[in-house]
Image: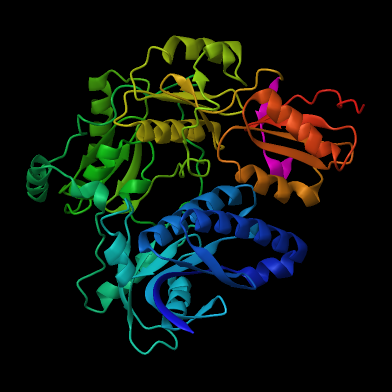
Amino acid sequence: MKRKIAAIMAADIAGYSRLVAEDEEETLRRLESYRAVFNDFIVRGSGRVFNTAGDAILAEFASSVEAVRCAIDVQESLRTRNLAYPPSRQMHFRIGITIGDVVERDGDLLGDGVNIAARLEGLAQPGGLCISSSVYEQVANKLSVQFADIGEQEVKNIPNPVHAYTLSIGGVHEQAEVHQVRKAREKGREGASWVRTAAIVGASVAALAAVAAVVTGVVLMALRHSAPTGSGTSVTMVAPPVEEKHAEVVVPDRIPFISDRDRADVGALYLPAPDYKALAVSYSRIGMVTGQADAETAKSGAMENCRRSLEESGLKDNTCWLFAIGNTVVYQGGYPPMPPRPWFRSDPSIEKPFNSMDVPLVGDRTRSWIEKNYPSANKPKALTLSPRDNAFRYRGASSRDEAVRRSLEGCGSVAGIPCMLIAVDDMFVVPIPATMKVVGFFHTTANALIEPGTRDEVARRLGGGSSGWSAVAAGANGLPGVAVGAGNEQNAIDAALADCGKRDRGCRIIAIGPFSVEAAEPAKVP
């Protein structure tokens, strides 16, 4: 047996027994699919799965940072997948992570490190994660996420209390973190501290001076360095549909639509400021006030500052929404649906210069808007679209990553479904089919032309291709053929048809890259 120090991740599904009791076959099928997501991100983080039992997953990493990054990526990806199911059938994992001394025996790991990770997983919210203080110390200044300090926790079969931190990623709306913070305060502790991360550490001396002004009750106007004038869309901007919201605390890195700099300022200036205070957001500006006489005055002041900032920037077609009162989120629009990360990965083999005439799935009116507004827009910029003839552009951001995020958020909030990034700066960043007509986004799990028992296989094979062109073919019996990593569109088509022809007849192309295409006549067999 060999001893070593490792970062241990433990995960299981909240309410798994209920899900199995309601529909065992469907639950087991999805568990296998979701495990494949875990495996993919674990391998990317240079980790390995060392045990699976029932719905549990145990993995080890050499790096705490990679373990936490993996957990966040997994939860974001699974959150998007869950959107396809009603709330009662959504499958939410809880994840716990610690660093500990473990014993390796026949590939399995044993010891306190494994036991503590499993106990921390029980403290996590469904769809979130819980880490030990030893892990927090390693990641606090390396990842731009905000953990809640829930203090020392008594956990089963562990003799000493475990100091823990939690992170809610939005899998389900629960009040666990707020509950734990209040409980800590009731016990006479100093209170769970909301820790500012690396995104806030770089706040300037001027920002620190502003904090002093806030403490004395000075109103903070909407910051002039908010998003540059630049969000735009081919549809009228309206508030996203109202959904039921439960109490949650403000986490700067989760506030939608606003700039990275504004997120940092919310953490550095707004969160530590005294009540009464409020925060309003729009697609391109924020407004906040602190130290007011009462909550109503704070609400009206934040909304007024947001609107004034829009008017000063010339963005009069934008709308402000009240996002928070105090440090509690009150925004009723819900977080915009987003595609899984990574949102953007440069791949020269599929990139080509942007041309509005090549943008798929848009009507003449939207195409005209794109042609007028996108090519001449300031960089960094990004263009996203939905299969519902919505397009959204963000221009003049502080970075390409910010332009991509804000464009996806704006498009998703208008369309009501995750949008697709198609262009960054002056290049298409997804393969744009030229040989066949695009008819929609390609979703493996819901495609009626693919035999249900093979859909997960198709998804895994497509997920394994990180570059080049891909294509999917389907035969008369729904058996698929898949090509990934091809050098061009035609090679991908030929390879997918050949792969399909090995197991079915009457094969035809149904997808190229991320798009569904109009199925052509079946390929003729010589």
Q: Is residue 175 visible?
A: no
Front in this rendered view, residue 166 or 48: 48
Q: Is residue 512 visible?
A: yes
Left/right placement of residue 506 relative to residue 274 reads right
Q: Quadrant of residue 320?
A: top left
Front in this rendered view, residue 374 or 101: 101
Relative image position of residue 34 (x, y in whole percent): 62, 57
Residue at image coords 22%, 43%: 265
Residue at image coords 72%, 42%: 446
Image color mode? rainbow
Q: Quadrant of residue 132?
A: bottom left
- Tell me if residue 217 comes above or below residue 175 in the rendering: above
Magenta span: 437-447
Relative image position of residue 465 (x, y in whole percent): 60, 41
Residue 440 within the magenta-colored segment of the rendering = yes
Relative image position of residue 503 (x, y in whole percent): 86, 43
Direction right: furthest residue: 526
